[in-house]
Image (cartoon, coloured by chain):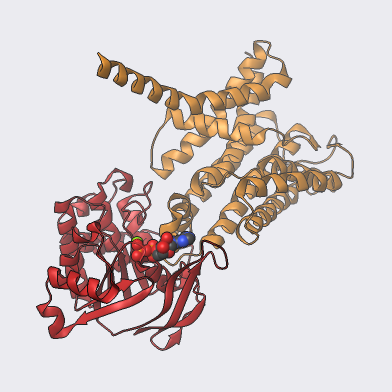
Amino acid sequence: MLELKDVSLIFNASTVHEKKALDHFSLTIEDGDFITIIGSNGAGKSTLLNAIAGTLEIDEGSIFMDQKDITFMPEHKRANFIGRLFQDPLKGTAPHMSVEENLGLAFCRGKKYNPLSKAIRKKDRPLFKEVLKPLELGLEERLNTQVGLLSGGQRQALTLCMATIVTPKLLLLDEHTAALDAKTSEQVMNITQKIVETHHITTLMITHNIALALKYGNKTLVMNDGKISFMLEGEERKKMSVEKLIQLYSQKTDQMFADRALL
Amino acid sequence: MSLYIIQGAFDLGCMFGILSLGVFISFKVLNIPDMTVDGSFTLGAAISGVVSLMGMPILGIFGAFIGGCIAGLLCAFLQTKLKIQPILSGILMMISLYSINLRILGNSPSLSLFGAETIFSSLDRNMQSLLILIILLVIALFLYLFLNTQLGLSLRACGDNEVMVRASSINTDVMKFIGLACANGLVSTAGALMAQYQVFADSSSGTGTLIIALASIIIGETLIRSFNLKIQLISVIIGAILYRFILTMALQFGVNPTDLKLLSALLVIAAISVPVLQEMRQRHKKRGAHRA
Ligand SMILES: Nc1ncnc2c1ncn2[C@@H]1O[C@H](COP(=O)(O)OP(=O)(O)O)[C@@H](O)[C@H]1O
Ligand SMILES: [Mg+2]
């Protein structure tokens, strides 16, 4: 469904700070894949998602979505079929608007509404409640609460609802539980799993937690220095343990995983 | 204070209200410090004055609104397409409008509408006040309805969290065009009403209007704090009327009219700094307690 062909992305080209964040990167993602992505700091994981989402324009190569070339499609157009979550729970929601208004905004994504029609219609409310209920955070009773007053975990869970209220073709998660405490993080991860499974959403998830990367999804992509170091799937992935993966990584890259990655 | 003066303050306060609603869109809803305001206010006064002299005062008001919208669009163009910083874009617009306004006024710094037909000229004094109030309320109502449409919601979100808005398939550039057009359209409308009300338009009538609007918004916010949009709009209007009363009172107490702008600036500084000072004091207290 998504194909990256020989994609390169260079920061500060032709200066001393030149950095090839993506180096002739090619990847084919199948429909329904849930790929977890790991790799040391600066490996280019976030850059990869930014390139797919259109936040950053790539310097070489091309990106295809369902055989359609989207290399030069602007970010807001790609957002019609791509849902996104960031590490920072503050990034995904509008703090001075209510839960309902945030959902209302997400709900009109990819639809051709009359821009002057009423944003929040009474008949949408049951649907809003329905998508909030599985979170088990009681948000369905707080539709009129200002989002800025919610906790980080609640905001991240809400962002997840917003990203998926109109089912996206592709969901991009960039360490979306990293800023949360352990318990909330697990909760949000469970919700993620539930939503992805229910709607069969093709997903790319960056994490710095190797155990999580192996536990969730059907493939694991290990990145290093803007390239794919190796990809795990099928039987090989099932048998993989955290220790073995770290060993494999240092063999392939002559590098040790940073401490952070072992957490 | 005589009833006559109170009524005058109320009228001006309502016109400040329209001005402040415009600035509310740019500064509060879109979160863009748009300095075009001083220029677009005068633009409205100039267009309204010239068209009134041709005998079409109502057209003058609508023309002023359109003129303001165009100024806003140009400002958004500078910001989004030419990537000029918002503050600088506004200042560039303000400066350019100064020359343009003078041209519209026929290269004279002021234009008297004495004897010309205005929207107020056939009304008695009370009806004049009523008309201004009605215009203000209609504008506020439309603004409220607009900000609750799909488009309006996107506009608000764009000022609240631009990163998120781009990730939810909304073109933030388009939002800035629409928002700044509306904002300056309203500011210009306020200028247009003011010119017909005061029976003259001059090239400096807009000077300091941005501060007036900010002061009004801040006064309103200080009195009524809410995240509910309806209440926010009401608080802007109340702030504007109250602010005009404060100015009128200051004048009654013998403050020199030329000092009013300084007074307005001080008021804005005070209102913004009070929370900061409070926080500083609290931190100081905490540290004191920590040491003890
Ligand atoms: N905006 C930027 N400007 C310059 N260099 C950047 C920028 N963003 C990322 N980089 C560099 O690109 C490389 C990849 O970054 P990133 O994709 O954020 O890594 P990570 O795998 O940790 O998410 C890093 O070396 C980083 O320093
Ligand atoms: Mg990253």
Quadrant of image for the C terminus of chain B: top left
Looking at the image, can residue B248 be seen? yes
Q: Residue at x 43, y 43 (%)?
A: B230
Which is more toward the observer, B188 or B72?
Answer: B72
Specify whether B20 is left or right of A67. right
Q: Quick one: quadrant of the N terminus of chain B? A: top right
Q: Extreme left residue here?
A: A239
User: Ligand 1 lies in which image quarter?
Assistant: bottom left
Q: Position of residue A185 (x, y in %)?
A: 19, 56
Residue A69 coordinates in the image, percent (x, y): 47, 84
Identify which residue, B2 or A243, lies in the foreground: A243
Q: Residue furthest front?
A: A254
**Residue B3 in which image quadrant:** top right
Image coordinates for residue A10, horizontal then vertical, percent: 49, 70
Residue at the spot 48% in from the left edge and 82% down from the top edge:
A61
Q: Front-most of A143 and B271?
A: B271
Q: Report which quarter residue B14 is drawn in.
A: top right
Q: Is residue A167 visible?
A: no
What color was chain B assigned in the picture?
Answer: orange
What chain is colored red?
Answer: A
Q: Residue furthest top?
A: B253
Left or right side of B92 for A184: left
Please tell me which residue is depicted at 70% across the width and 19% down the height of the picture.
Answer: B259
Q: Is residue B198 above or below residue A259?
A: above
Residue at 52 percent of width and 75 percent of height: A59
